Image (spheres, helix red, strand yellow):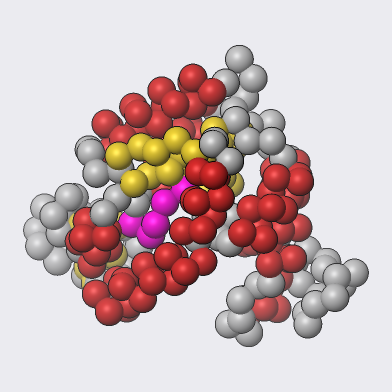
Amino acid sequence: MSEPHVLLLGAPGAGKGTQSKRLAEAFDIEHVTTGDALRANKDMDIGHMDTEYDTPRAYMEAGELVPDAVVNEIVKTALQEADGYVLDGYPRNLDQAEYLSEITDLDAVVFLDVSEVELVDRLTGRRVCDDCGANYHVEFSPPETEGVCDECGGDLIQRDDDTEDTVRERLRVYEENTAPVVEHYRDEGVLVEVDGEGTPDEVFEAIHEEVDAAT
């Protein structure tokens, strides 16, 4: 069996990060996220591109969005260095989806289908340790003692981007920019939808079966 090229799609809170890591381990392939790829290549020389800055780091330090053209270049580099991969967090818009089709062939495009009500519950319930960064959830994976990190005893906080107003804005931006990407793959007849509201194990099993069938 060849090493699979998998694209995992879903809204914020759908579980892409968790499931991507498990898939990468199960199939012994790379877990490629735009965030990790950007951090790994933040000093890449992009002076040849018609951009404001000469490195991705400069955009990040200025608090500016890294342009699509730069993100495309970084993702291309990450995919070229991987035999198999699960791609998580890219493409975020139709232009990126079209670029992706030019640089690689996908074996499976999996969409984690989760209702907005569930997404809001998941995202607003997240708590993060202020000291070590460990993640918890008030409902799905609470700490042993409320408000206290199991790992280091630090205080658990709700991040600013996990408040309900911010979460709803993140979902609105997702609907505007990334939902058309899901429709794009659906129209091409390659999209596989998995119910993302089961337990993490149930969701993983369903994704694993789809990837197995596609490779």
The answer to whether 115 appears left or right of 193 in the picture is left
- Residue beneath the point at 80% across and 77% down: 51
- Residue beneath the point at 22% across and 38% down: 199
**Image height check: is 39 above or below 17?**
below
**Image height check: is 127 above or below 112?**
below
Number of dots carrying numbers: 0
Does the magenta-highlighted stretch encompass residue 10?
Answer: yes
Which residue lies most toward the top here?
1
Residue closer to the observer: 101 or 4: 101
> Which secondary structure type mostly characterizes the magenta part of the structure?
loop
The answer to whether 186 appears left or right of 16 in the picture is right
Quadrant assignment, res 205: top left
Q: In which quarter of the image is the C terminus?
A: top right
On the image, the x and y values in percent for residue 114 come to: 29, 50
Which residue lies most toward the front here?
187
On the image, the x and y values in percent for residue 153 come to: 21, 62
Quadrant assignment, res 111: top left
On the image, the x and y values in percent for residue 68 come to: 68, 67
Residue closer to the observer: 64 or 176: 176
The answer to whether 146 appears left or right of 11 in the picture is left
- Residue beneath the point at 26% across and 54% down: 115
- Give the magenta-colored segment's residue range: 9-13
- Residue 33 visible, this orientation: no
On the image, the x and y values in percent for residue 11 come to: 39, 57
- Residue beneath the point at 70% across and 78% down: 58
